[in-house]
Image (cartoon, grey):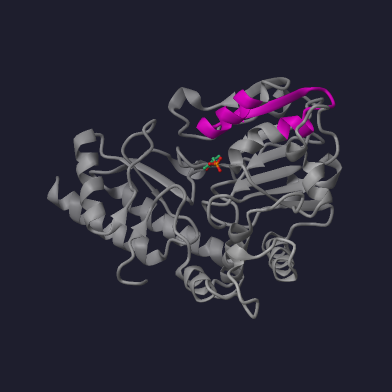
Amino acid sequence: MATNRVYNFSAGPSMLPEWVLERASSEMLCYGSSGQSVMEMSHRSSAFEQIIGDCEASLRRALSIPEGYRVLFLQGGASSQFAMVPLNLLTRSGKADYVITGQWAKKAWQQGRVYGECRVVASSEDRTYSYIPQVDPAQLDPAADYLHICYNNTIYGTTFSPRTLPVSGSVPLVADMSSSILSEPVDISRFGLIYAGAQKNMGPAGLTVVIIREDLIGHAMEKTPIMFDYKTHAGAGSMYNTPPTYAIYICKLVLDWLQGPMGGLEQMAQRNREKAELLYDYLDQSRLFSPTVQGEDRSLMNVPFVTGDPALDAAFVKEAEQAGLVNLKGHRSVGGMRASIYNAMPIEGVKKLVAFMQAFESDHR
Ligand SMILES: *Cc1c(COP(=O)(O)O)cnc(C)c1O
């Protein structure tokens, strides 16, 4: 890593691969033979059409997105999807089920309720969202327009897995994957719709990716704003209006990196497991730091931990920052610390963090 750069453990926006930043930097003034920066380029130019086409093809390859799904490049963040999903999908029975595993899931539910009958079918709020609640299939409404989950809970450090994923039968499963997309392979065919803000694992803020099964497009509520109708964007190749061109270009570079030097999604997942294991193994035997999540619900991407003493937590965060390990402060609702170790966090960064924690522990015990 460049010597003046820090290891940034922020939950988002987060680190980007240096490979990507260097590439973007070398193409900043002149992209290919275009004589201009991607930022200055018409979104209708053939050079940009190539970029967005490559980005989609590359994402399809990385995630093995099957036929019958559309990929949309939108704006408005994952938070806009909290409204866009019900506006487009909550139109047959007007009922939907939500699993509440944290603040993002709750915000999605609160927004959904504006548009229809949105039920909470399971929640882990009773223990500060420190686990993934069991979803009893008998509790699910077979007539619901969708079942909504937040796949990886960025604030609390819990994640669904193929094993704990609710089985929703013919009810489309909708997942907020903002903080886990591209961290490991997922079976897209289990989902009706997946959405993700790009700023955790895919690129810079400003781009939101939606992967949607084709049959779910075209049923929006009557007064849905044109910009909030999936059909608008699906029908225009995400070019109904100006898409976030530069963010799409960086996303394409991130995918080039993932499938080039990183060796693909399977390899990426292996590295992510190694990184998370380093940190959890240390936390599990530490006598100063405790992880806030136990067992199989542990996220590979966001790892919260506490000392139990807020003053000591604050001292840790401050000293870590001085050592070039930044943004380790936990979310206020959990307290303590949180290390977000997305795809672009090198294993060296996690090793450095663990070594720093060991030294801090021997100084404060
Ligand atoms: C960051 C995050 C959001 C919010 O994303 P915006 O793009 O800022 O709207 C929503 N859900 C999850 C799981 C997140 O991690």
Residue 5 location, quadrant: bottom left
Left or right of 312, for residue 336 = right
> What x and y, as percent, mark residue 102?
51, 32
Q: Quadrant for ligand 1?
A: top right
| Residue drawn at x 58%, y 63% as measured from the top left | 39
| Residue drawn at x 73%, y 51% as measured from the top left | 72
Quarter of the figure that contains the C terminus? top left
Q: Is residue 68 above or below residue 226?
A: below
Name the foreground residue: 135 vs 250.
250
Q: Is residue 172 above or below residue 138?
A: below
In this orientation, does residue 140 appear? Answer: no
In this orientation, does residue 108 appear? Answer: yes
Left or right of 242, for residue 28 = left
Quarter of the figure that contains the N terminus? bottom left
Q: Residue furthest top?
A: 117
Q: For the magenta stretch, what is the residue range?
A: 85-111
> What x and y, as percent, mark residue 293?
42, 39
Name the foreground residue: 58 vs 294.
58
| Residue drawn at x 23%, y 44% as measured from the top left | 287
Name the foreground residue: 278 vs 224.
224
> What x and y, as percent, mark residue 211?
72, 49
Residue 113 location, quadrant: top right
Q: Is residue 65 magenta?
A: no
| Residue drawn at x 36%, y 33% as measured from the top left | 332
Q: Is residue 91 magenta?
A: yes
Q: How many marks?
A: 0
